[in-house]
Amino acid sequence: MATKFTINGEAHELDVPPDMPLLWALRDHLQLTGTKFGCGMALCGACTVHIDGQATRSCITPVAAIEGKEVTTIEGLATPAGKAVQAAWIGLDVPQCGYCQSGQIMSAAALLAGNAKPSDADIDQAMSGNICRCATYARIRSAIHQAADQLAAAPSQG
């Protein structure tokens, strides 16, 4: 039976085994390769996507769990928080190798969507499931603070 869901604002119906990890459905069936495979056990965060706005590890999320839900990948991250995080990442030259960065950005955008002015402790907690082998953690934290400042300075929409 096909799974119906929305990905990056588009309705999709995917006929894959219901226990297939979302990561592989995204990469192999929808050609959305920005979401990376890291560990396959939800320990590194490289596979982070948003499901209904929540940062979620796609490597352990079965396709059946996304029925009727909104999935956002790095390719579709167009929220104000997402744009601010991406701009800060570029402005502060956060990545070194870049492999983990899509997952880092997805987690940071989810944090800022729910917490407009996170403390260092808030950032450390929200980002604790994302591993960076290049150890750019100080730049990641700085970029999140910069993105929060950018969002706070932006004129209100409405």
Image (cartoon, rainbow, N blue to C red):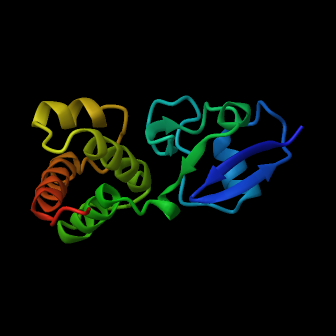
The residue nearer to you, when weighing 32 against 82, is 82
Question: What percent of the width, then of the height, locates residue 89?
Answer: 26, 63
Residue drawn where x is 69% and y is 46% of the image: 5
The furthest residue to the front: 158
Residue at x-position 18% and y-position 45%: 116
Q: Nearer the viewer, residue 20 or 53?
A: 53
Residue 133 showing in the rendered view:
no
Residue 55 appears in which quarter of the rendering? top left
x and y percent of residue 3 in the render?
A: 78, 41
Left or right relative to 43: residue 136: left
Q: Is residue 34 left or right of residue 68?
A: left
Count every numbered label the image shows and give the total.
0
Q: Residue at x 13, y 43 (%)?
A: 117
Q: Is residue 114 visible?
A: yes
Considering only vertical position in the picture, is 127 above or below 100? Answer: above
For residue 74, above or below residue 16: below
Q: Quadrant of the N terminus?
A: top right
